[in-house]
Image (spheres, rainbow, N blue to C red):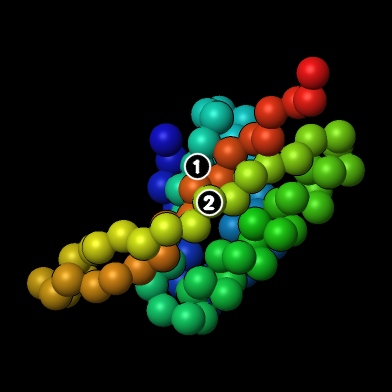
Amino acid sequence: MEVLKVAASSNPNSVARAIIGALRKAPQVEAHAIGAGAVNQAVKAVAIARRILERQGQDLIMTPGFIEVEVDGQERTGVRILVEHKPSAP
């Protein structure tokens, strides 16, 4: 599973394209963000990716959670966003 690191300075359109590209290769992708600005960009990217996929007749599921990451030798709490294709209705 691919892990995308999202920063406050990340372009949400670029991250959205990366999410879609990763979902073409694997059923799931994770986006990791530390800080309010980065989380904001990550959520916007998922919304943009969803809008693009909806136009193609697909949908996705976003599941947020917390992660602990080491940054410069210190433990930081970040947000982990799991993104996966939504199963088709029977």
**Residue on which the image places disc 2:** 63
Residue 57 found in image quarter: top right
Q: Determine the residue located farthest toward the bottom in the rendered image.
A: 36
Q: Determine the residue located farthest toward the top in the rendered image.
A: 90
Determine crowd level at label 2: few under 14, some 14-19, many 20+ residues with C-alpha closer than 10 A: few
Residue 18 shows in the view: no
Question: Residue 29: which disc?
Answer: 1
**Label 1 SS:** strand
Identify the residue shown where x is 79% and y is 18%.
90
Circle nearer the viewer, 1 or 2: 2
Where the N terminus falls, by quadrant?
A: top left
Q: Position of residue 82 (x, y in %)?
A: 49, 48
Residue 7 vs 56, above or below: the answer is below
Q: Position of residue 69 (x, y in %)?
A: 24, 63
Mark 1 or 2, nearer chain start? 1
Q: Position of residue 83 (x, y in %)?
A: 56, 45
Q: Determine the residue located farthest toward the left in the rendered image.
A: 73
Could you tell whether 78 is left or right of 2 in the image? Answer: left
Identify the residue shown where x is 25% and y is 63%.
68
Residue 58 found in image quarter: top right
